[in-house]
Image: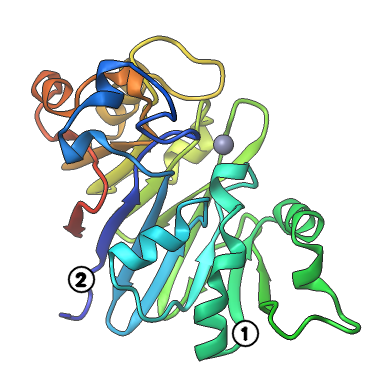
Amino acid sequence: MKNNVLKVTFLGTGTSQGIPIIGSDHPVCLSDNPKDKRLRVSALLEWEDYTYVIDCGPDFRQQMLANNVKKIDGIVYTHEHNDHVIGLDDIRPFYFRQGNISIYCHERVLKNLKHRFQYVFETENKYPGAPTLDTHIINDDPFTLGNKKVIPMNVYHPELQVYGFRFGDFAYVTDAKIIPQKELDKLKGVKTLVLNALRKEEHISHLNLEQAIDVVNYLKPEKAYFTHLSHHMGFHDEVEKELPEGIHLAYDNLQIEV
Ligand SMILES: [Zn+2]
């Protein structure tokens, strides 16, 4: 891969239940279009020899297999909701091959992971099949992934703090309902923005389509991709036609180079 090119793969673009929802007769859940099938939200970032994953939800194993991922240099967490963290046990194949796996998260998220995955953090008589992590706490300061500077921003879901991340001209923000002005300022000048947009109707903890478009119109990136989509957003191909120029619905396994 060329230097400085960041390849982003949308591993999952669905909301917490995924699409289709189990047992649902909703037309979007019954759609044959692969773009209407959405695993839980996650993204793969690759540049030079580096590979990082944003979030590690219940579809992590399937996402790694679908994209033939051979190694990961770390997992970066946005927040601790189940659909973003519960796949952690499936990092074992990487751990067995590579050794300790780095994770990057808010201190509060680490506390939550220790509670959910107590056996992973065991220090005495740890089961040898459990993975071991190298933990890196993120605060408001920029941090480094591989050789890239990452600027974290605090968005709110609606009360829970969630990290968005900016890598140069590219930013990834999911599970936002509120983005304070100070944090919006950190996104100014991005050329490619990934942002959550749940559905057309208002929702308590996620930006809806109109609100997400407002954020894009304010920041004016060259391109924006919406993710964390519910089946209530509608059929991919129909919504895509209604969107303003430069704005797209992401779909699973879409790859972009930024
Ligand atoms: Zn969430």
Quadrant in the picture for residue 218: top left
- Residue 221 visible in the current orientation: no
Does 200 appear above or below 7? above
Q: Residue at left 54%, top 30%? A: 180
Q: Please report the residue visible at 59 percent of the width from the left and 76 percent of the height from the top.
A: 102
The C terminus sits in image quarter: bottom left
Q: Amino acid at mark 2?
A: Val
Q: In the image, residue 199 lies at what x, y percent?
A: 36, 19
Dot 1 beta carbon under 8 Å from ligand 1: no
Quick check: 127 above or below 103? below
Q: Amino acid at mark 1?
A: Asn
Identify which residue, 185 or 47, lies in the foreground. 47
Left or right: residue 57 versus residue 89 is left
Residue at (20%, 51%) from the top-left corner? 254
Q: Where is ligand 1, by quadrant?
A: top right
Element type at mark 1: loop
Quarter of the figure with the N terminus: bottom left
The quadrant holding residue 67 is bottom left
Tell me the residue at 61%/47% (across/down): 79
Residue closest to the eye, 113 or 89: 89
Callout 2: SS: loop
In the rendered structure, which disc, 2 or 1, sits on the residue that comes first in sequence?
2
- Foreground residue, 2 or 11? 11
Q: Can residue 51 be seen by looking at this rendering?
A: yes
Residue 221: % across, % down = 22, 40
What label does residue 5 carry, if any?
A: 2
Give me the disc on residue 100: 1
Q: Position of residue 247 (x, y in %)?
A: 18, 33
- The residue furthest front is 23
Vertical arrangement, residue 248 with respect to residue 145, above or below: above
Could you tell me how far apart the alpha carbons at marks 2 and 1 are, in whole angstroms? 27 Å
